[in-house]
Image (spheres, helix red, strand yellow):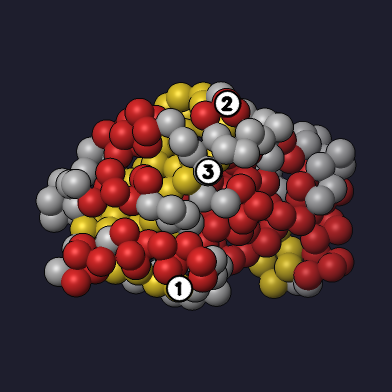
Amino acid sequence: MLVNRKIAERMAKYADLKENDIVLEVGCGTGNLTAILLRSSRVIGIEKDLKMIEKLKERFKNEISNGRFRLIHADALDIDFPIFNKFVSNIPYEISSPLIFKLFRYKFDLAVIMLQKEFAERLCKEDSRLGVISKAYCTCRILEVVGRENFRPVPKVDSAIVLIEPKPKITVKNRDLFEKFVTFAFSMKRKRMQTIVREFKKVCGIELNLDTTLAFRRPEEIGASGFMRVVDDIRTG
């Protein structure tokens, strides 16, 4: 749990919240960040823990009553997200990867998210499955590193606040195939791309036309643009 109120206030400031924004928050906890978000915008909160739900209902009964705060008791990975335009959350770190990939499927203006520092660094670089896929859909950057001493209980790792902004136009023609191939490639990341493409055809029955300039490179060396070039030139094998 984030206990430094100033950091929570900075998260809201980074999101540049306006009165007509609808903010989605996953993992509201006791509602410290929620309270700050509600100063500027309407908020939809998703919380899995029933004990936290009861505390949130009591703390924000007026906001719930007047419609400024909508509280959903659910696992965020199991439900369709309601309509929102900004995402601001100190998310449970154990669901970071599936939640980020789910977020990529929605239309929104920006996201400000607290993540483990190591995960945040992977998200913002193009040398991993996570980074390649995120680069194809969004621009991501670390806004600040947050020391572990700002949380209770104190975790073993530091955290980071990340800004995610979707690209105006996504040029990936087949998102499912793109994500499937990137995942496959990084499961064989020590291999060169020509070997990976050949194995992908054997396993998935899909033949990809590999540019000769990429053939002898490894997955972490070609970036999102390289993967998009491979996937967009497709034949059925």
Q: CA distance from mark 1 to mark 2?
A: 29 Å
Q: Of residues 100 and 63, which is closer to you in this image?
A: 63
The image shows residue 40 at horizontal and vertical percentages of 18, 46
Q: Residues within 10 Å of mark 2 (few under 14, many from 20)?
A: some
The image shows residue 130 at horizontal and vertical percentages of 62, 46
Instruction: Give the residue type at disc 2.
Output: Glu
The image shows residue 15 at horizontal and vertical percentages of 29, 40
* Res 192 quadrant in image: top right
Instruction: Give the residue type at disc 3.
Output: Met
Q: Is residue 35 above or below residue 47?
A: above
Residue at x-position 34% and y-position 67%: 57
Q: Is residue 212 visible?
A: no
Q: Is residue 220 visible?
A: yes
Q: Which residue is mark 3?
A: 1
Q: Of residues 220 and 77, which is closer to you in this image?
A: 77
134 lies left or right of 210: left
Indicate which disc, 1 or 2, sits on the residue closer to the N terminus: 1
26 lies left or right of 224: left
Mark carried by residue 149: 2
